Image (tube, grey):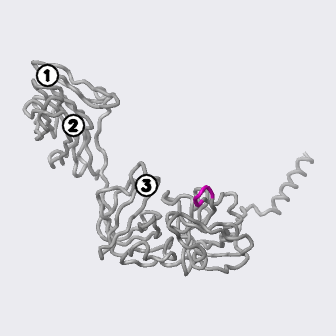
Amino acid sequence: MKKITIILILIAAILAGCDLKQDVAPMPTFVGEANTTIAELLAMHPIGSEDSYDSIPIGSNIIICGYVTTSDEWGNNYKYINIEDETGAIQIKINHTALYKKYQIGERIYVKCDGLVLGDYRKLPQLGLWANGAMQPIPSFKTYLYLFPDGAPTGGFNPIDMTTVPAANDIPSTMYNRKVRLLGATFVEGGMATFSDPGAATSHDIKMSDGSTITLRTSNYATFAGKILPVGTGEITGILTRYNNYVQLVINSPDDLVGFTVPVERQTIFSVDYNNAFNDGWFQTGTGNDWQTMVNNNFSGFVVNPASDQDKYLISPAVDLSDVSNPELSFTHRAPQGFSPNTMMCFYTPNYTGDMSSSLWIPFDLSAATGQTTSNNFSIELPEGAQTANFRLMFHITTAPSSWYISDIKITGVVQ
């Protein structure tokens, strides 16, 4: 017991002498001063007609300083940061991701340029290394040799306002990579297209009030790539870049857009899993050959090959549209040897009673190119009376001249 008591006393004494609060590492600071402006650095490399570079000799002791203006937090900037001072801006290529955790917007960065390469990619000034005939990023494990964050992210410059966009060659190199604000800007495809297509980075035109244009460039990996471009006229803050003779703008996030109207995005309310359609509530009634599901590399949907006594109804499960605004029905259909609206029909009911014959069925006016085998897309905004909790579709085929194929059945709308 005496030994245990002594041990406990020792532990208490040790704890009493310790500060149990977690130590917080101080913000890094740079010992030294910048001796070169970014504009002076840019003047060391004239932009050529092709990608080119100029090495910065080791021992030249060139140090620049600027504030970070880009972030890869939203996925639209990849393996680089931009910094700017009062005179210009430069893009610094770094072979690492999640750079925003180390280099934050508004943070001052000192850059020792000795041993780096000042070059351009499609006439956009960059700082990094050169290999295999192109600008290359600084390896992440070597950044400590060149980049020196200095204090908390509290600085930066106001964006440069632009009401017109000159031609690419009329913009000085010191303006590229700078943070600018477009005033009186309108997205040409506002409300109609997403920021980026899924498969590749995408360009969209922005029209200024004077008629000049600039291209918004968005990565397909951006977190907002699938959002609809806003409508109206507003202000856009981003980084001014170029690709050969095209003037471009890159934003960090949708927060850089002010004054626009954000379109309400439509959602898919109802679609069909054709592998399990008849287990998911689809059913049929009537005489003649049954509706079948077909799923292969060329087609996924319903198909029926009519018999001489054909009079078959295919009915969907209930779809709740009671809280949906502007619901829209769409599907694709084809008849290999001709479509007839008298033998191939589509209906809906706002309130299925549980019995097909006693429910009110309202027809859609279907059409297709008679005598052709091409698929035809049908799309219609459902009337206000269709917005009920018990909406159902029905496809009806009688003694038709050919098979009927129906696919891509979908209802979209805005959920309130």
Q: Main secondary structure of the magenta part?
A: strand
Which amino acid, by three-letter code, is at mark 2?
Ser
Q: Is residue 294 left or right of residue 381?
A: right
Position of 164 relative to 393 (above/below): below
For disc 3, the marked residue is 201
Position of 362 relative to 252 (above/below): above
Q: What segment is highlighted magenta in the picture? A: 131-135
Earlier-in-chain disc, 2 versus 1:
1
Which secondary structure lies at badge 1? strand
Earlier-in-chain disc, 3 versus 2:
3
The single residue placed furthest to the right in the displayed view is 2
Magenta includes 134?
Answer: yes
Which secondary structure lies at badge 2? loop
Which amino acid, by three-letter code, is at mark 3?
Ala
For disc 2, the marked residue is 375
Please state which of residues 398 and 349 is positioned toward the viewer in this rendering.
398
Which amino acid, by three-letter code, is at mark 1?
Gly
Q: Quadrant of residue 111?
A: bottom right
Please state which of residues 412 and 416 is positioned toward the viewer in this rendering.
412
Residue depicted at 14% across the width and 46% down the height: 385
Position of 4 relative to 242 (above/below): above
Residue 46 on image: x %, y %: 55, 73
For disc 1, the marked residue is 286
Please state which of residues 29 and 20 is positioned toward the viewer in this rendering.
29
Residue depicted at 14% across the width and 22% down the height: 286
Residue depicted at 9% across the width and 18% down the height: 309
Residue 90 on image: x %, y %: 56, 71
